Amino acid sequence: MKGEIAVILFLTLTVFGRQIPSVVDQDAADTEECANREIIKAPDEVDDPVVIDGDILVSKEQAAIYYESGWDGLVNSEAWNTNLYKWNKRIPYQISKEIKDPSDSKMRSMHLNIRSSLQEITQRTCLSFEPAGCIDFTYLYFAKGDECYTYLGAPVFGARTVYLGYSCGGGSSRARTPAHEAMHTMGRYHEQTRPDRDTYVTINANSCDDQMKKNNKADTLNIGYDYSSVMHYSRWQCSLSRPDKPSMTYKKWTGNADYVGQRQVLSAKDVEHIKVYYCPSMMMRLVGGRDNSEGRLEVNNEEVWGTVCSHGFDTNDANVVCKYLGRPGVEEVYSAAHIQNIQSAQDSPIWMSDLECTGQEDNPFTCSQKVMKHHTNCDHNQDVAIRCSKAARLIGGNDNSGRLEVYYNG
């Protein structure tokens, strides 16, 4: 009965609640009334779910289809909601009292990982995670679990539950597991299940096929494959993996194999996925370089990619851009005209000009600049290119070994 009342109240507020503010005060979220409210799960969260693909919860009916015919059979079935719901740009969240228990060191570690995960997404995208208030009927709920798992997509209403266990969600090496699970609720699948995965990885069908089935319906958003993604599994992820037979091998990865599957920092492409899906007007990328840490700087405006004019562009601006892209800083600013074999930008607009950053900003879009439009006082011979420092390095060994160090948040 309480659940029915809450549903009716939610629908009433949706239709008639235009006076409700979109942003909730921090104090309102911390009231005892809100902290003790009954958690009403989203209607698609079943009482006895099954885990598929390592950490995705589905109903028994959906699981049966998945194990019979994989992702392709499931997403094409009547049992699957083909249109996953999206969050608004403001995402309310609540953390269970068990995880917030200050007397439990393991829970403190998970609590810290949740906070830092949501903070990084907030700082690097247009999304804003805020403590849920009493009037938030749709929100993300972090609960203590035996392992880490959640459902795909945002809820229509109610709490979208993310379960976290210390073995997978605690400690510094698992700092971005909460981000991994939160990105599932944003509609993101695992990287190693995307349609083009066979070009990049080989799955050992004898040890892990059931957990790593290919999903031909997963939208890559025209973003390249990313071994560094927090959404990628490690080669040892499957419970059936053995030292002599990992669950997958990497075809094009030349770095330390144990870096793949990292959960310490969002990769540049992780951030790009969120921006393409939720905030297309806040995207930047580097094109035509030797890797994704260098190239011609391009910015997306009105869902069209364009370039950046070199008028006034200096190392302060480049530093902010590199950090926005998840890199430690800038190594070089140069002209895109010097990049060999790069696709011409002649038909692209020049969106950004006279950028004036101090070097301390977190976001280049907040720096002083001319209005975002096609600037005709600049030509493509003046397009900016930059080389950023790499976000990971090996120290104390040779080219293929050493202590792995990862750049994060300065």
Image (cartoon, helix red, strand yellow):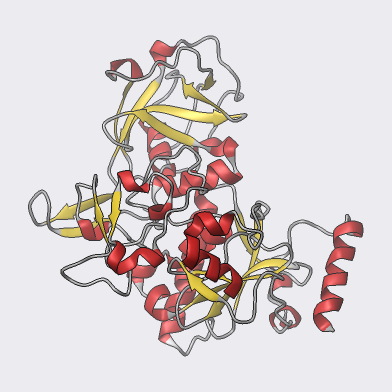
- In this view, the residue farthest toward the left is 398
Q: Is residue 125 above or below residue 144?
A: above
Residue shown at 45% from the left, 78% from the top = 147
Q: Nearer the viewer, residue 22 or 14?
A: 14
Residue shown at 58% from the left, 75% from the top = 60
Quarter assignment of residue 131: bottom right
Q: Is residue 149 left or right of residue 268?
A: right
Q: Nearer the viewer, residue 108 or 313?
A: 108
Q: Position of residue 25 (x, y in %)?
A: 72, 65
Q: Is residue 140 above or below residue 223?
A: below
Q: Position of residue 271 (x, y in %)?
A: 47, 48
Q: Is residue 219 left or right of residue 168?
A: right
The answer to whether residue 59 shows anywhere in this view is: no
Give the quadrant of the N terminus. bottom right
- In this view, the residue farthest toward the bottom is 103
Q: Is residue 403 left or right of residue 379?
A: left
Quarter assignment of residue 205: bottom left
Q: Position of residue 356 (x, y in %)?
A: 49, 29
The answer to whether residue 176 shows anywhere in this view is: yes
Q: Is residue 16 above or below residue 390?
A: below
